Every structure is written in structure tokens, then in C-alpha cells.
Amino acid sequence: MVVANPPYMGSKQMNALLSQFMKDMYPVAKSDLFAGFIERCTNLAAPRGAVAMITMQSWMFLSSYEKLRASLLTNQRITSMLHLGARAFDSIGGEVVSSTAFVLANVPTEGRNPTVSRVGTFIRLVDGTSEAEKVTALNTALEARTNEADFHLASDADFTTIPGSPIVYWLSEKMRGVFTSGDRLGAVATLAVGLQTGDNSRFLRQWWEVSRARTAFACTSREEAKSSGARWFPYNKGGEFRKWYGNQEHVVNWEDDGADIRVFGAECGGRPRSRAQNTDTYFSPSVSWSDISSGEAAFRRYPHGFIHDSTGHSGFGDGILLDRIAMLLNSSYVMKVMQVVAPTMHFHIGYVGLVPVAHGVVEGLPTGPIADLVETARADWDTAETSWDFVMNPLVSIV
């Protein structure tokens, strides 16, 4: 048996010597030193030995550890886990370290097939905010041994049915089943990241900071925007948590089809610092969401006229499709799915594209409710003077 509490160090903090060593010796675990120790400890253990470790939880979910998870689920079996989450140690404050304690059993190749469906025990203790609370939750789970008490049983086969094989042990059988049927959202709609200006302080403004006469709010294409002679155009930069409509306050300098942005950084022969990505989607209606959220994701409808940012991720299609996708993405079902495919605070476009969509679901969604939801959210947004469609304070209109 090998027991360890390994050191942590992300690849960005490694010096050149250590970074190259990790790439050469532990290519599937090179993202962090602790991941290399996981792989090393499994090599140190005997063919049917066990490895008991406490590490950061990131290897369970992040795409950068997908190859490591694939290796562990091929050569080892997770026999037990205490998913501790943040604040597992009173001596470590805040949300800095989210940890998990687990036992891996080495499984020789000849004995692998019978073990892939053998369940391991997983206890979820992520909600407690102190050592004492987690101890209490652990005792409750061990006594009750029910899902409601956060005591779960799951096998390696359960994880491999989900794209990227995240260790999402708490999913029900029905929820796991949705990942094996239907299409992915990325196949239903066109999902795209947008513009990286290279210097937002130079090219972005709040809409009220620039001349309205030099701003075009409703262009439907790049050609129309260029011929308008305007300098400033609405910019979808993501923003705070807000569903259905809103976060429309920035404009970007896209004069002459972004001539200044396109050459930024290359004026003296260097490489451009900006990236004008997926320009064919600029000014098109969309469903959009912010790259980072402190909680669940929020999806919004945007009309035509916007250029979208690299953090204002967007989906494109015809209007009816976008309305139905917005309904789907803001549903409680997708919120549960996002906990699986995007378990951190990042909702980048690859994660959202993995949302499973059963055949016929999108086509069967009504569009009437979203029209009301978007209109209600729009009216709320326009009550603030920071909206370019603001007319009157609602308190004044009542009088």
C-alpha cells in the first residue's frame, strides 16, 4: 500500500527543468505536480496493491486531466472516496483548496473486465464549512447509507459513459443515461467564441462614453457596419449573472471592419495581439452566456447588432431555434447537466457544447413563454439609465 499527501504545483509555476521532466516522465499528469504523484504512487504499489491519497479535487473534473482519468479508469479502480471540497481543514481558510481523499486499487489487465462494474463507495462532504460539520456529515452518511445522506455507489463504467469521464459519482442512473442518447448541443446549434481585442482599455468603452452619432446599434452584418461609417458598435462581453436579456452596455471600436484591432501589435512587424475569431457570426442574433460565474450559468437572448467577445460565448441559428435553445439552457435540467460537464466556475464553450439534447426536444419546445420572459427581462433592463433604450424612471412614470 502507498499512502501520500503530495505537494501541489501547477504547470505554470514550474521552472523549465521540472516542466520538461513532467512532460517526459508523466505526460498524462503534467498539469500539476500532485497529479504526477498520483501516477507515480500507482506505479509504486504492487499489481494488486492500493494507493490512498488526499489531493486537490481538480483531477476529478477538469479537461486537462482527462487523459489521467482515462488511465486511472483503465488500470486502477476507485474503491472509496471522501469528496471533501473546500474548508476541509480549519487551518486553511477560504475556498483556496478543494480536496478529495480516495483509495485506488491496482487492477492487473487479466482481472480488469469483471471489476469495471464493481461499485466503489463515495461520500459527498462538499457542503460543510468546517472540519466539525464535515465529520458530522460523514457520520450521518455512514449511518444512513442513502443518496439523500450523500452516500453514493458508483462504478468505473458509470464514469466512462460521460464525455471526458468526470468522476461524477452522485448522478442517478437516469441522469447518466441522457449522455448516451440524442445529440450534443454543439451539433444542434453553431457555438462560437468571438473577438479578442488584445487591449480592452484601448478598444472598448461604455456606450455613454462615446458619441452617439458615431455609434451604430442595429447593424445586421459586417458589410452594413462598414458602410455605416460608424466607429462604435454594441459589444457582448458577458457580464454579471442575468437570464433572458441584459448586460448590454459596452461598445467596441470596429470602424472599417475592425481595421485598427486587426493590426494591433503588428505595427512594427510583430504578431497581432488581437484575434478576430468567427467573424461570420458578428452582428447575428444569438443566445449568449458569460464564461465565468460564481454559481450556475445564465443564458440570454441578444438581438442582431452585437459583436461578441471571447468571454461572451454565443450560440447562433435561426430565431426560433435560438428561442428554444434559450428555454432549454435556462432549465433546471441543464443546470444539473452543467454540474457534470462544467463543475468549476468556468462555462467555456466546449462544456456547453456537451449538453445532451434528446431527439425532438428542441423542436417540441414552445416559443411563446420565452417571448414573455425576454420581454420582462428587457423591460427590467431598460428601467436603468445605463440602458441605451432607457426612457423614463418607472417611479416617475407611475406619477
Image (cartoon, grey):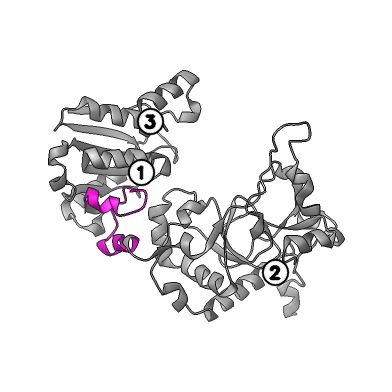
Residue 81 part of the magenta segment = no
Counting from the top left corner in percent of width and height, residue 68 is at 33, 38
Q: Nearer the viewer, residue 120 or 117?
A: 117
Q: Is residue 15 left or right of residue 302?
A: left
- Find the magenta span and give its range: 154-179
Which residue is identified by label 3? 27
Structural crowding at the residue carrying mark 3, measured as other residues with C-alpha within 10 Å and reported as few (<14), some (14–19) or many (≥20): some
How far is disc 1 from disc 2 in space, using C-alphas? 40 Å
Amino acid type, residue under disc 3 in the picture: Pro
Q: At 58% across and 77% down in the image, what residue appears?
A: 371
Q: Earlier in the sequence, mark 2 or mark 3?
A: 3
Which residue is identified by label 1? 85
Q: Nearer the viewer, residue 313 or 56?
A: 313
Counting from the top left corner in percent of width and height, residue 285 is at 64, 66
Which residue is identified by label 2? 382
Spot the residue most to the top: 17
Task: Say which element carries label 2.
Answer: loop
